[in-house]
Image (cartoon, rainbow, N blue to C red):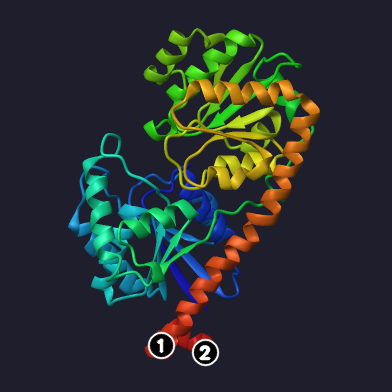
Amino acid sequence: MIKVMHVITTLGPAGAETMLCRIASGMDGTRFENEIVSLTGVLDLAESMEAIGVRVRTLGMKKNAPNPLRVMRLARWIRESKPDIIQTWMYHANLVGALAARLAGDVPVVWGIHHTVLDPRIDKRRTMLVSRACAYLSRKIPTRIVCCSEASQRIHKKLGYPDEKLEVVPNGFDLEEIKPDPAARASVREELSIPADALVIGIAARFHPYKDHHNFIRAAARLRRQMPEIHFVLCGLDITWQNSQLARWIEAAGIRDRCQLLGVRRDMSRLFAGMDIATTASLSEAFPIAIGEAMACETPCVVTDVGDSALIVGETGLVVPPGDPQALAEAWRKLIQAGPEVRRRLGMAARRRVQRHFALPVTVERYQAIYASMAAELLQRVPSPGLSQCAR
């Protein structure tokens, strides 16, 4: 049995966190044992992990107050738990997990990269410093570095990460769970009091400058002037009318009566299946999970050309420059005017593309192969108790 300890900044409802839970759920329980340590107390996804027998703990770190004593505590947990491999997720966890692994006795570490470009105008100074520290330590500490997108790998190679350690494992999607729903179009419109024949454009993204909701709102206002009957559905963390900045943008754009703000939803497959077009408006992405989910639900997508977005949609959607509301609105208009049959064909092609390139079992097996390879290398050097039992 190979024991993997995953260290992640939070277990909140976001991309990397969701992928960790999907991967842990899909791994072979006869070969691998997983546990999760969250650096902070944000544990929205913990219950689903504990339900399948994955232990979840939190270090209780404060986001704006790094504490070396917490690193020491993690090192103690590593010594007590005796994982064969530590998988870390995102910059802060990469740094904390790597330092704790060294303190605990040099346990092999796999870093997870789920970022592309950092912008000092948007990202916090602490995040920039952590990123630079990781670039320096990347040659010294992690055994492997897994990027969720081609763009992440390319950018981090330029930042000085060693090419021989870098590899891409794209995000994956459970196509049994995320799938078309013929009843969703009617049920979503009924729930949201949207006319049954109305066209709906949707965006699923937490409220963050990189997601550029202002771009989305400005594009929505442009399209509304041409097509007054269009409705817009927005969901994600802090996507509510209590978000005063978002509400002000919508009011100023004159589209409040056409916008639904739904916050965090647990029925994303149904929502995506109920949309006519799914979209991003982002300034930066690595591998946007929302787009893969929408495609798996046979919903055509319009994406900004950031990260691997264009690679993901291929010929099944439209790609526009980031920060250009006119181009975004025009792409939406083209898909609307193409008609329902063209959108249906694009949506079917989108799901087939996810099946070919981004199916969850393939992603899970890639991670398992990395862990198995590392465990075999470790066994040749200094067998751990867990690996020794496996060898016997």
Q: CA distance from mark 2 to mark 1?
A: 9 Å
- Residue 273's place in the image compared with 149, above or below, is above
Specify the quadrant of the image occupied by residue 314.
top right
Q: Are marks 2 and 1 in contact (CB under 8 Å)?
A: yes
Residue ID at (30%, 40%): 119
Measured as percent of width and height from the top left, residue 138 is found at 30, 65
Measured as percent of width and height from the top left, residue 132 is found at 24, 54
Q: Is residue 303 visible?
A: yes
Q: Which mark is residue 383?
A: 1
Q: In this orientation, which residue lies closer to the viewer: 317 or 295?
A: 317
Total number of numbered discs in the rendering: 2
Q: In this orientation, which residue lies closer to the viewer: 163 or 186?
A: 163
Horizontal relation, residue 216 to residue 353: left or right: left
Q: Amino acid at mark 1?
A: Pro
Residue ID at (59%, 11%): 224
Furthest toward the bottom, the residue is: 392
Q: Is residue 45 visible?
A: no
Mark with earlier residue (2, 1): 1
Q: Amino acid at mark 2?
A: Ala
Horizontal relation, residue 158 to residue 239: left or right: left
Horizontal relation, residue 334 to residue 19: left or right: right
Specify the quadrant of the image occupied by residue 271.
top right
Q: Which residue is mark 2?
A: 391
Element marked by disc 1: loop
Horizontal relation, residue 269 to residue 196: left or right: left
Count residues near mark 1 (Cα–Cα under 10 Å), then give few for <14, some for 14-19, many for 20+.
some
Element marked by disc 2: helix
Residue ID at (45%, 69%): 4
- Residue 28's place in the image compared with 248, above or below, is below
- Residue 11's place in the image compared with 341, above or below, is below
Measured as percent of width and height from the top left, residue 247 is found at 43, 15
